Image (cartoon, rainbow, N blue to C red):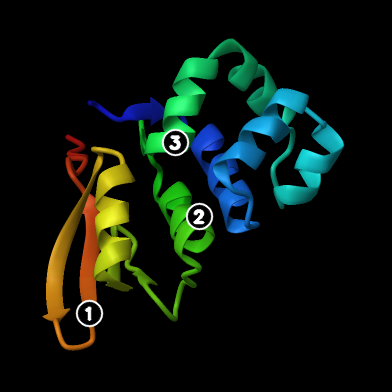
Amino acid sequence: MEKVKLALNYALMLEMMKAKGFNNPTIVALLNEGNEELLESIGEGIPSWKSMVDYYHGNKQKCHQAIKSGYEFSFLTKGALKSLLAIKFGMKEGEDFVDNGEFLDTVKMPADNLQTLRNMIAKNWTVVLQEEDKDQDMYQLKIELTYKPNFKLN
């Protein structure tokens, strides 16, 4: 079964709920209820949860599948990728990865997180294995754009 594709804002909102410890049935109940005040207390920096509640009510089957079975981002900017690493995996720029301008470098994570990332990352990014420490179950990665822009000005 193909993974559901979610827009960046909806996927990050789900990840914020999961990061706060809410399980799948609780997430569904919160979205069904649509208590925006409660939801806003969950999502730091999210301007409005009304769009998520409206999206959920208009796309319940898709949302249930995404919550239960996972999803793939339809597209990620570099900033959103960094937010995903922070929200989903608790990673910090400068400690767990380096922003090299064009790509994220020296991204360190265990195998289970690597598999999760590979399953959900948008197709516009490619995860490149740099180093592997099987004894520590840690991997060092580079995450780069799949299709690099070619800006040739004449």
Image location of residue 123, percent across then percent down: 24, 38
Q: Nearer the viewer, residue 51 or 154?
A: 51
Q: Earlier in the sequence, mark 1 or mark 3?
A: 3
Q: Nearer the viewer, mark 1 or mark 3?
A: 3
* Horizontal side, residue 146 vs residue 17: left or right: left
Furthest-right residue in this view: 37
Residue that carries the numbered disc 2 in the rendered image:
83
Callout 1: SS: loop
Q: CA distance from mark 1 to mark 3?
A: 27 Å
The type of residue carrying mark 1 is Asp
Residue displayed at 44% across by 78% down: 94
Q: Earlier in the sequence, mark 1 or mark 2?
A: 2
Residue that carries the numbered disc 1 in the rendered image:
137
As drawn, the label of residue 68 is 3
Q: Quadrant of residue 96?
A: bottom left
Callout 3: SS: helix
As drawn, the label of residue 3 is none
